[in-house]
Image (cartoon, rainbow, N blue to C red):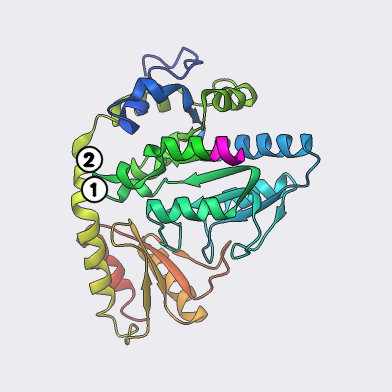
Amino acid sequence: MSDIHHYPAADQEPAKSKLAGFLWPMDALKHNGRLLLGNGASELIDLVVRKALEEARCRGVHPTWKAGPWHGQYQEYERSARTHGFKILDPFSKERADMVCIVNPCNPTGDYLPIEELKAWLRENAATNGTVMVDESMQLWHSSEFRSDSLISQHEFMQSMLENINVSVHVMHSWTKIWSCTGLRVGSVICPTVHHCEALRKIQVPWSVNGPALKFVEAVVKDTDYLNETWNNTTHLRTYLIEQLKTLNAYNGQWVFYGKPFLSWVWLDVGSEAMAAKAVDKARAAGVPVRSGKPGYNCNTFVRIAVRQKDKVAILIKAWQSL
């Protein structure tokens, strides 16, 4: 609080360097110039989309956009692309797109491409002179070895995509998820080069990341106990959640559970739109975080359930006893 009478640091330091140290413990100085913080991932998504549109117009192209190969993903990428006039392709189309945006792991479906499969998919779907955004916000839950299965460690791949087919690969993170700080609005983008990062910074609103958010980043990257607790407990708690849901009479062997074991939520198909709506209403009345799959995703029989401590799971199970 003692610093709020100052403007936030225009260069985002020392928060940016601290975050770089978290992402690349062995060579942060080498890659720090490719990192840019933003007012949540949303601001940075829009910056990359705007820059891609500008480049497409310079080539005389009406650009196309494609999501990852999922039956729905976080909507902010498509929303920005539509706003800026991109032609939206079917996510399962074989056509290469001028802009490819994949959320991996996918929120909300829980699908996940390991790093080699992800790179192969990007090579097959990004058009020459195109732009790629890969959102790895939920990949942090993977394990303490998350970096080895992440694009943050794939510097040679990002360079080869740029040199061979002039495709710029950007890695996006919303840090509000893993560190439970949604009110602070902190995101980052890793650009393929320092030049790409500077180009985004020039069109970014000054001081877009507020002072408390920058201070939070400085502190939270050092909280190894929090991350270790997350990695040690999430998979077990997710398994427990599914086991408890299977005890409900409404389950009856018909519900289908989706998502990788390390994820912090369960994507659940209850098989009926009416039951899904009823489940959301009962959970909301009990104060339990369950979201409908209908808004934005048109997955009308699905609900998204957050992984929580066992006492919180008990509240949900009690609320759903009468489904």
Dominant SS type (magenta): helix
The residue wearing badge 1 is 230
Quarter of the image where the N terminus is located:
top left
- The residues tagged by marks 1 and 2 sit, at their Cα atoms, a distance apart of 6 Å
Q: Residue furthest top?
A: 6
Residue 162, magenta (yes or no): yes
The amino acid pointed to by label 1 is: Thr
Q: Secondary structure at mark 2?
A: helix
Element type where label 1 sits in the image: helix
Q: Residues within 10 Å of mark 2 (few under 14, many from 20)?
A: some
Q: Amino acid at mark 2?
A: Tyr
Residue 147 point in image, percent of width and height: 32, 41
Q: In which quarter of the view is residue 280 placed?
A: bottom left
Residue carrying label 2: 226
Marks 1 and 2: CB-CB under 8 Å?
yes
Relative to the observer, which residue lies in front, 53 or 205?
53
Q: Residue at x 64, y 40 (%)?
A: 49
Q: Which residues are magenta?
A: 161-167
Residue 69 point in image, percent of width and height: 53, 62
- State the quadrant of the C terminus: bottom left
Give the side of residue 249 with respect to residue 93, left or right. Answer: left
Residue at image point 35% right, 42% down: 180
